[in-house]
Amino acid sequence: MNMRVIAVFALMGILLAIVGMVQSWNVAFNILNLCVISAIMTLGVNMQWGYAGLVNFGVMGFVAVGGLAAVVIAMPPVEAAWQAGGGRLMLGFGVMAVVIAVATAFWRMTKHRLSRRARYIIMAAILVLGYGLVRYITDAAVVAIEAVEPAKSGYLGGFGLPILLSWAVGAVVAGIVAMLVGRIALGLRSDYLAIATLGISEIMIYILKNEDWLARGVKNVSGLPRPVPYEIDLQQKAWLNQLAETSGQSLANASSIIVKLCYLSLFVAVLVGLFWLAEKALRAPWGRMMRAIRDNEVAAEAMGKDVKGRHLQIFILGSAVLGLAGAMLTTLDGQFTPHSYQPLRFTFLVWVMVIVGGSGNNYGAIIGGFIIWFFWIEAEPIGLWLMDALTAGLDADSPLRVHLLESAAHTRLMTMGVIMLLVLRFSPKGLIPEAKR
């Protein structure tokens, strides 16, 4: 670790400490938790882009899949919904799996036996008939499930298991989805791959918003179980009452800080583990092979490397990390809100984190996640303070002062642009560039 890495991380620590002293430590630890989750997302994208040169604009789709895993694993099952249509819905999924298996087997077995035109016609017929049969079975089940107390449930619920298990499940499911997406899209050129992954991400989130039986759609799922204590339970503890009295904090504030520290310990443990694994992989022969493929695919293929296979591998690994981050974010929020996954907004925010931090460098990915999310949150209060200072000499009801104060909330995007321009001007390869090995 060189002095530049130490200096950048120390500066980030100073900024968080200033927020703690000026605003509150509650706010500072909340920002820090979100920074850690952002850093994990950035590590996932950095694996795909920094290691292998893959442009994945479907970030939010895989994050949403991870969030869905938290609901499916941790929420209790809705017994009435299962009785109303759960069995029939599972039957529909079974039929869908059979249709896909039959279509796949037909396509493989008739490769050299039928003409191309005949294969396409029969394949289309199998898929259309299969789709019609699946819809016939599942439509009535979906209507019955969504009619079960729609104001409170209206979905199947989950398995009622510990929510920490959903972090691993979110990573696995996101990896499986990435495998399916990668087999379709990874043969495309980089610009088409970016468009395809963005479109697929929009489709994923559209499904989550509209399939109420799955996770209540835009009505959201709230009240997810926690892996840490509840504030109200902590406030009953004698040691916390004594600590709050000694430190001069209110009991509510002290309990909230303790909860955020508990979350932070879990998140940091995951981040450190992922960072260690990512560094090991990057320094291993596998990492050198991935960088060789990134720098010159033709030369790597000429040396006998399976470029498409390695691209699919790194696409799955990076997407699994994004799914893990999505499950962690839903756990922290305590609710699953599909409408908050905005691909055209947050996907590019994660990419800014990678660019600002330094693609190809895991330290850069982490610090990029910290810095960009910090200023994404703090841009509004900083902008409000700045506008207030600049217009201090004007009357309180001055149209210019009122307009500037009201516009402070919109300085967030301008701040992101300024940070990115400054970094690209003075450190084009990011704050912590990729090390030459």
Image (cartoon, rainbow, N blue to C red):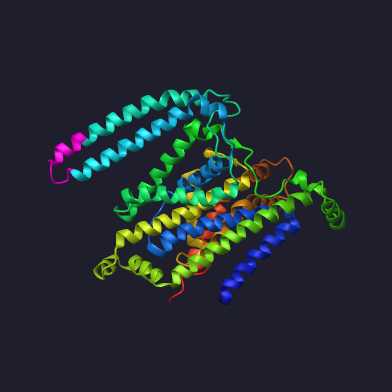
Question: On the rendered structure, is 286 left or right of 41?
Answer: left
Task: Please say if 66 is above or below 283.
Answer: above
Magenta-drawn stretch contains 113:
yes
Residue 383 placed where, x, y %? 64, 51
Residue 377 placed where, x, y %? 62, 51
How many discs mark residues in the rendered view? 0
Residue 375 shows up from this direction: no
Which span is picked out in magenta? 110-122
Question: On the rendered structure, is 275 left or right of 29?
Answer: left
Magenta-drawn stretch contains 166:
no
Task: Please say if 204 is above or below 227.
Answer: above
> If the image is split into quadrants, where does the C terminus sit?
bottom left
Quarter of the view holding residue 297? bottom left
Residue 316 shows up from this direction: yes
Residue 307 placed where, x, y %? 30, 62
Q: Which residue is pictured at 77% across the width and 48% down the height?
A: 234
Quarter of the view holding residue 101? top left
- Between 345 and 402, which is closer to the camera in this rendering? 345
Question: On the rendered structure, is 129 left or right of 225?
Answer: left
Q: Which residue is pictured at 38% across the width and 26% down the height?
A: 137
> If the image is split into quadrants, where does the N terminus sit?
bottom right
Residue 238 placed where, x, y %? 85, 51
Question: On the rendered structure, is 238 left or right of 118?
Answer: right
- Between 415 and 177, which is closer to the camera in this rendering? 177
- Between 302 and 71, which is closer to the camera in this rendering? 71
Task: Please say if 137 is above or below 251.
Answer: above
